[in-house]
Image: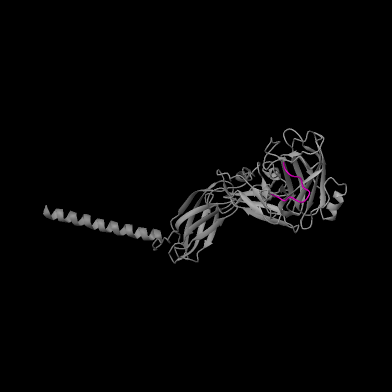
Amino acid sequence: MKSLFRICLFSFISIGFLSCEKKDTDFKNFLGDKEITYPGKVVKPHSKSGNLRAALVWNPSPDPSISKYVIYWNNKADSLVVNSTNHNTADSITAIIPGLSEYIYSFTIFSYDNKGNRSVPLDINNVKVYGPIYQSGLLNRVYNAANPFTITDEGNVVLNFLQADTASLNVSTVIKYTNRMGEEAEKMLSPDSTTITITDFKSGSPITYHSGYVPVRGAIDTFYVDSYSNFPDVNGISVCAKSLFKENKLSGDVGTYDNVTRVSKLWDGSVGPQPFDNIFHSDGGSGMPHTLTFDMGKVYKKLTSVEETGRNCCNNPDDFEIWGIADITNAATNLSPTNSGWAAEMQSKGWTLLKEVKRTDDGQAALKVDFDPSISPVRYIRVRIKHVTTGDGNYSNMSELTFWKNVFN
């Protein structure tokens, strides 16, 4: 029995060895007497969305045998080859995939060595590609309708916008305008700013703009709104700064009723007809016509208009003249404003009659009138009141005087 057991055990062991040797031979035959080689795969792959294209980015494999990378998509119906020239894992490789549709894609990347061996596949999924559908939903930034622009004393135009829409990733807004050389120019409004200053704007020329967005942070393309929007007309007209105004009484000018109703009440910023004592009120001993003079604080090359507001009751001017001059040196007159030769003397002293205003109402409401476009530069204003609505021969009242300028001329 022991001999039989030894014979059987030897037979099983022999069969086992023979069986293993045969499987090993079969495996080598299947591989063609070669070992399987897998080149190193790429590291840290990610994607960036674009306009009908996408970017795939990865760190190269440190495997020095790799000669190229092949990217497949659309179930391997489409592919792109990227040659490998760098094996530094601290660097990055970017492959732009063009000609895509507005869709969500999956990409597969293989590394290949010079012998044609390829790595295990590496997938990049959920790559969203944007295009005309996304672009059609974009809108230009909104300007501030309540105050679309301001004009500085230096003649610069400041365009005012509302905050950028946080629902979209606005990256810029291109402003197109014509400069003073007659050339088309552009400026860029950043998404975190609500104002942009144009220092060389040509008066009366149009301003258009369109905004750019990225669909997601890190996108490789900026999408601009299909069409430009029109900015409101910038005419260069703005109010003269009343903070610069100051009294400048000349010989022959009228006095005031009391110290409260001074000439400076005419630029205190009050709106609408005012009651006593928030008005200019002349004294009672100067007769009619009478004059008052003040300094606007700086020379304005082109005054465009004036607005006069009367008192809320009486003695409002219904016939008065506005005179102007740039330099008041030796500009005082000797004749009384009641003298028929006064106007001729004013002109001989360098004064210009900017406007004679005649009202047919009660003189209370604000009345704005334009000056002749050809008037000379002006700093000092002299008002000659010739008649008031009540027919009074001494007293005149006014609430406010406002002047406008064209800063581009």
249 is within the stretch colored magenta: yes
Q: Which x, y percent locates residue 301?
A: 76, 54
Q: Which x, y percent locates residue 230?
A: 70, 46
Q: Is residue 390 left or right of residue 276?
A: right
Q: Is residue 12 left or right of residue 131?
A: left
| 270 over 30 or under it: above or below | above
Which secondary structure type mostly characterizes the magenta part of the structure? Answer: loop
Q: Nearer the viewer, residue 368 or 5?
A: 368
Q: Nearer the viewer, residue 384 or 5?
A: 384
| 360 over 32 or under it: above or below | above
- In this figure, which colouring scheme has been used for the structure? one colour
| Residue range (magenta) | 246-256
Count of numbered badges drawn on the protein? 0
Q: Is residue 334 left or right of residue 11?
A: right
| 351 over 265 or under it: above or below | below
Tell me what residue is drawn at x 79 percent, y 43 percent.
286
Residue 235 can be seen, yes or no: no
Residue 59 can be seen, yes or no: yes
Q: Which x, y percent locates residue 277?
A: 67, 37
In the picture as drawn, the residue positioned furthest to the front comes out as: 285
406 is within the stretch colored magenta: no
Q: Which x, y percent locates residue 292?
A: 76, 46
Q: Nearer the viewer, residue 339 or 240?
A: 339
Assign the C terminus to one quadrant of the image.
bottom right
Q: Nearer the viewer, residue 347 or 19?
A: 347
